[in-house]
Image (cartoon, grey):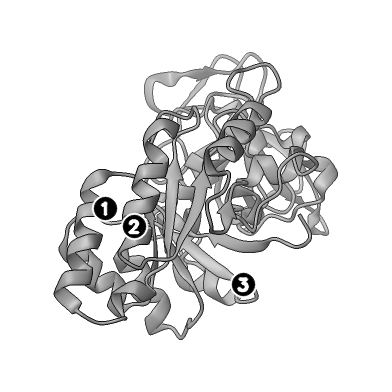
Amino acid sequence: MPNSKVWAVIKANAYGHGITKALEGMSGTDGFALLDLAEAKTLREHGWRGPILLLEGLFTQEDVFEALDLHCDCVVHDLNQVDWLESAIEARQSSDAKGLQIFLKMNTGMNRLGFLPEAYREVFHRLHAVGYQVSHMTHFANADYVDRTPSVDQQVELFNQTIEGLAGKTSLSNSAAILWHHHVVNSDWVRPGIMLYGASPSGRYEDIEHAKLQAAMSLRSKVIAIQHLDSGETVGYGSRYKTDVPIRIAVIACGYADGYPRHAPDGTPVWVAGATGLAGGQICRIAGQVSMDMITIDVTDMPHVEVGTDVELWGDYLPVDQVAQAAGTIGYELLCAIAPRVKRS
């Protein structure tokens, strides 16, 4: 997809990374795609003058005029939105409403948002008739699976058949399609999301290791205490972890109030700095229930670890997808869950 323009998806506060941080790091993109008008306003207030796409479109009729004032483009997936847009043309009686670019969403099998193919062309003609520039969009349900239907090929075929003969640009590929289906999917715009942050659409780091993506977020903290436990002692709330040999426990200043998953089981990996720093570190394992503000890990095999030793919960040395797999979730959730109290730098 070398000729496609890029909507850099920064919804959900840029997947937990922060809208303004995303703007700093991705200012070379062709456009930003996000969810709501508050995020769009933040971008404009911080100097972004390029395209902004509202991925779920308008939630009320009043949103039309704020979207126009912020010079946003808009996904349309519901007939109420079509009615509001037609009314906006009548209310403004000028060309500024027509300047709002529409990305009309087709439901080709995701069954979440969008117009079914049999209704799609009629909606296109309604919007086109009142002067809007209309582009075409769909979303893949199974781009990260090889054995599920509808397949990417099936959705692309249905999409192309439906828009045949209609004017307008296209927007198709999410991160998974860009990574694994670029040879069969062509569109004017692509919409990378999770891959921009160095995490996998499938939730499996091994699926993206070949792509050499870099983590945009490194969640780091320090050891704040060391405990020496004998055989038969327990650690943390509920005494979940019980020692069978003497061990050394390090207490880390991070917990579920910071966004770390409380349900992370014993054995979940944490990267602990070596004697020469994080680059020379190794994986240690959680031992005991994650608390609101603390995590306990077994550092028996790292005798140099002391109060003040650096740790990485995920990031440059420990992919977020590996932590997520151990915790029974996906990297998306961990990134988006980072709490406001966590300092971003």
Which residue in the structure is indicated by mark 3? 25
Look at label 3 and name its amino acid: Gly
Coordinates of residue 228 in the picture (x, y in percent): 60, 34
Coordinates of residue 257 in the picture (x, y in percent): 37, 47
126, 310: nearer the viewer = 126
Which residue in the structure is indicated by mark 2? 127
Q: Measuring 38% from the left and 70% from the top, which residue is drawn there?
A: 72
Question: Crowdedness of circle 2 by 10 Å Cα count: few (<14), some, many (20+)?
Answer: many
Which residue in the structure is indicated by mark 1? 82
In the depicted structure, whether residue 60 falls above or below residue 30: above
Horizontal arrangement in the rendering, residue 96 relative to residue 303 (left or right):
left
Q: Are marks 2 and 1 in contact (CB under 8 Å)?
A: yes
Lower sequence index among marks 1 and 3: 3
Tell me, for residue 111, which label it has, or none: none
Q: CA distance from mark 2 to mark 3?
A: 35 Å
Lower sequence index among marks 2 and 3: 3
**Disc 2 element:** helix
